[in-house]
Image: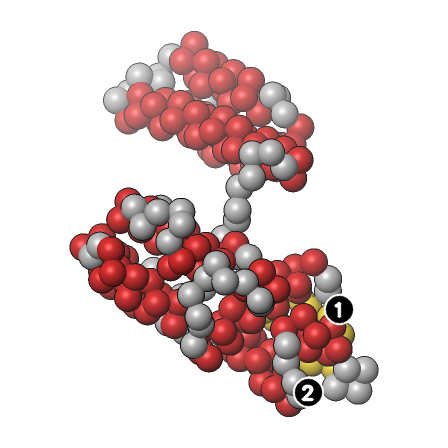
Amino acid sequence: MDQDQEQLLVLCKTHKAKALEIVVEKILSNPNIYKFAEFLDLENVQKLGEANKHLKTLKLFAYHNYSDYKGSSEFIELTEPQLKKLKMLSIVTMAGENKTLSYSTLREELDIGSKNDLEEILLESIYNKLITATLDERNQNVQIEWTFGRDYFYDPTSDNNIEIDKLSSWVKKMEKVEDRMEALISDLDNNLLESKEAKKQFVEILVSESATDDKESSIMKKVGSAASKITGMFR
């Protein structure tokens, strides 16, 4: 974790009300912080209240874009560095949706007047590792290769979260597999796997878990490889 982020997290835990709002402004201004979920999860931050403009603005930077800010009175008035940071985060979102972005689209969406100003903010986004991209001045576009992962806004009513739910379920299943492996390896350390029956049980558990979902095959191959090494000790 970035040192600035650690210090600001501590300040969020120890400040309240107006003092905390000043800390939020520092978070928004910091050029090294582009993830905000850890701040939003803090009890003191949540206690600002849903109607609080500072909390709304922190959520804006976490989940939304410049277009949501433009013309809205729900948020605090941003300084120039904060505004640039929000535009850079918006570029990340746009780059995640389209691997080729035209200069004209970017300038329109982000209210950037000149080509030079656009290229400056694009280069700063690349320097800060928010995107990996190539600027094509001849064709006036940006070719996107990679994007930074912004905070994810979970909307339980959205169909887009079906895969997220499946992934969460799969992760929990893998955690159970890991726990069972650790327990059996502990038995190994205690010389409790010397019998053929125990070795058979160890392998059967792993095979059973790996057969539950074809999508898990690549990870379970690694698990199976680890199991083979362990059981090979008893052949």
Q: In the depicted view, which residue is nearer to us: 173 or 122?
A: 122
Identity of the residue drawn at 53% across and 28% down: 169
Query: Does residue 196 appear anywhere in the picture?
Result: no
Residue located farthest toward the front when viewing the structure as drawn: 73
Q: Nearer the viewer, mark 2 or mark 1?
A: 2
Q: Quadrant of residue 106?
A: bottom right
Q: Which mark is residue 198?
A: none
Q: Position of residue 132 (x, y in %)?
A: 61, 71
Left or right? Give the position of 231 relative to 95: left
Q: In the depicted view, which residue is nearer to us: 115 or 221?
A: 115
Q: Which mark is residue 115?
A: 2
Residue located farthest toward the left when viewing the structure as drawn: 14
What SS does tag 1 mark?
A: strand
C-alpha span from label 2 to label 1: 16 Å
Give the vertical position of 32 relative to 40 (above or below).
below
Q: Position of residue 5 (x, y in %)?
A: 32, 63
Q: Are marks 2 and 1 in contact (CB under 8 Å)?
A: no
Q: Which residue lies under the disc numbered 1?
A: 100
Name the amino acid type tagged 2: Lys
| Colour option used | secondary structure
Identity of the residue drawn at 73% across and 62% down: 98
Q: In the depicted view, which residue is nearer to us: 206 or 197?
A: 206
Q: Position of residue 212 (x, y in %)?
A: 60, 21
Name the amino acid type tagged 1: Thr
Return the disc, 2 or 1, that comes first in the chain's sequence: 1
